[in-house]
Image (tube, grey):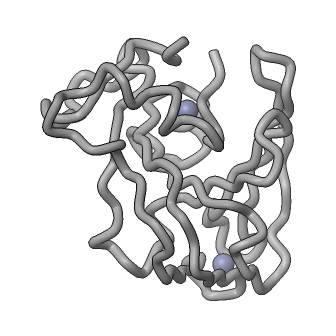
Amino acid sequence: MKCLESGTSYAEQFSEDGPASQTVSGVIKMTKISGSCLCGAIRYQGDVDIKMIINCHCDDCRRATGSVHGTMIFVPEDSLEISGSPKGFDHAADSGSTLTKLFCENCGSQVFGKNTSREGVIGIRAGTLDQKELIKPGMNLFKSSAIASTPMDPDIKVFDKMPS
Ligand SMILES: [Zn+2]
Ligand SMILES: [Zn+2]
């Protein structure tokens, strides 16, 4: 079981069965963002289109982030300016694509994720973002793997695993 790692077309893919009041969840056009790892050796900034924000409760995201779920913000990679040199860790997804976790070698913060099947998109770990007000996840994924005590917003979509 592997997680959704990045999302070029998630908005298009998942926008149909949501609550009527919901706009395409998590999509924000051209907004200025910045962030950093815990020690500040890795920083990023850019004017980005946020494609999608998700909470992922899969086992990989929990282990990778060390938290009860991962929250990812997907943006076009070329709109993000990254300073510092994150170290990469690759692992395989069920789909056959390779997922890469990018983290600070000094403090250990995981800052980005990439997926070979989603060229040109990078996932930012939401906890590293300076603009906390932008972090509005549009869906919860892998509810089937979630920690029972983890609250889930009833107003956003929930998927037991990966939506197909
Ligand atoms: Zn995941
Ligand atoms: Zn660091």
Which quarter of the image is occupied by the C terminus? top right
Determine whether, in the image, residue 105 is placed left or right of residue 5. right
How many circles with numbers are drawn on the protein?
0
The x, y position of residue 143, in whole percent, is: 36, 19
Q: Percent from the top left, x then y, of residue 159? A: 37, 18
Q: Residue at x 39, y 39 (%)?
A: 68
Residue situated in front as seen by the camera: 47 or 66 = 47
* Residue 67 drawn at (x, y percent): 43, 46
Ligand 2 resides in the quarter of the picture at bottom right
Q: Could you tell me which residue is drawn at 62 percent across and 82 percent down?
A: 46
Q: What is the x, y in percent for residue 113?
A: 69, 51
Which residue occupies 59% across, 60% down? 124
Depicted 104 relative to depicted 62: above or below: below
Q: In which quadrant of the rendered view does residue 2 lie? A: top right
* Quadrant of the image containing the N terminus: top right
Residue visible at 42% across and 81% down in the picture: 130
Residue 139 vs 136, above or below: the answer is above
